[in-house]
Image (cartoon, rainbow, N blue to C red):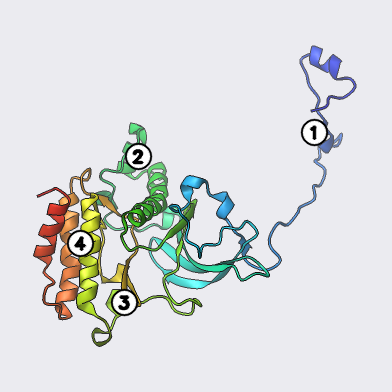
Amino acid sequence: MRLHEDSQHQVRSGKRRFDDEETFSKRGHRRQLEVICDTPDDGTRWSTWDQSSPTERGPRPYPEWLVTELAAVDFELGVLKTGKEADVFLVERAVPDTDRACLLAAKRYRASEHRMFHRDAGYLEGRRVKESRVNRAMAARTAFGKEVVAGQWAAAEFGALCRMWELGVPVPYPVQILGTEVLLEFIGSKDGSEAAPRLAQLRQDTADLPDLWRQLVEALSTMARAGFAHGDLSPYNLLVQDGRLVVIDLPQIVDVVSNPQGREFLVRDARNVATWFSVHGVSGADGDDLAALLVADAGLG
């Protein structure tokens, strides 16, 4: 940075006067700076793809449908779901004047003061950080501790989705994470007019429930062999798209090895979903049998 002409004297006297000081008048008022608006002419925002680091993006290879061009624009199309922990929005990421576009689900976790995660103490077992001070704050739910806990949920879900995708568990492709926003593959119609229904919303006479049960058992078994339980599994966080079962809502995923309650989470997940299938006429759906299978797959038998 260039010094003023009298800088030599000022450096010798221990003072420096830089050009930046010219932004102030003699009365100490800063000059008015020009504000430049950097929002797209059309759309909600520029694509945030380049704002996420490589470790904050989904597993490679990236799907062909995913738009990663930096010239892309995000168009917010509406709300897909509201919840206690987060709201989910439908976003179209498109490159203007081209046919490059994709639909995403933007899951935005709420500020810590609005969080109402139920039974979160149990889920956080096994999620520890290096500093004991932080762990104590988390356990005591101090203001700082709540902030730490809040920040873990989006990261936990994104990390879980990446791991499950790599294992072959049917989950939405995790596109990227940016702060407390997780961008996912939209599961629904190609034009975004309709989201895939939840398992609980299916009509028994129009769905192949025995095949969906088979898909679910295979997915849960894959997770258990890798040491994981969904942690809050129910017919409301399972989607069905064209006969394909998709597992969603994984912020509370449980490492069943490090979590002292890991076995209980496996058993509860198994019984929750098996009860629904059994009530809806799937004869082979037995919660105790599924629980025993998952416990054995996880090596906890």
**Camera-nearest residue between 97 and 125:** 97
Query: Which residue position is annotated with label 3?
Result: 243
**Which comes sooner in the sequence, label 1 or label 4?**
1
**Which comes sooner in the sequence, label 2 or label 1?**
1
Q: Position of residue 43 (x, y in %)?
A: 64, 67
SS category of the residue bearing label 2: helix
Q: Position of residue 290 (x, y in %)?
A: 13, 63
**Camera-nearest residue between 127 and 98:** 98
Mark 3: amino acid: Gly
Res. 220 in view: yes
Which residue is at 30% across, 69% downward? 238
Q: Nearer the viewer, mark 2 or mark 1?
A: 1
Q: Nearer the viewer, mark 2 or mark 3?
A: 3
Rendering quarter of residue 236: bottom left
**Which comes sooner in the sequence, label 4 or label 2?**
2
Q: Position of residue 135 (x, y in %)?
A: 32, 38
SS category of the residue bearing label 3: loop
Q: What is the spatial separation of the Cα atoms under label 2 and label 3, in whole angstroms?
A: 45 Å
Q: What is the spatial separation of the Cα atoms under label 4 and label 3, in whole angstroms?
A: 22 Å
Mark 2: amino acid: Ala
> The N terminus lies in which quarter of the figure?
top right
Q: What is the spatial separation of the Cα atoms under label 1 and label 3, in whole angstroms?
A: 64 Å
**Which comes sooner in the sequence, label 2 or label 3?**
2
Query: Which residue position is annotated with label 4?
Result: 269
Mark 4: amino acid: Asp
Query: Which residue position is annotated with label 1?
Result: 20
Query: Which residue position is annotated with label 2?
Result: 137
Q: What is the spatial separation of the Cα atoms under label 1 and label 4, in whole angstroms?
A: 61 Å
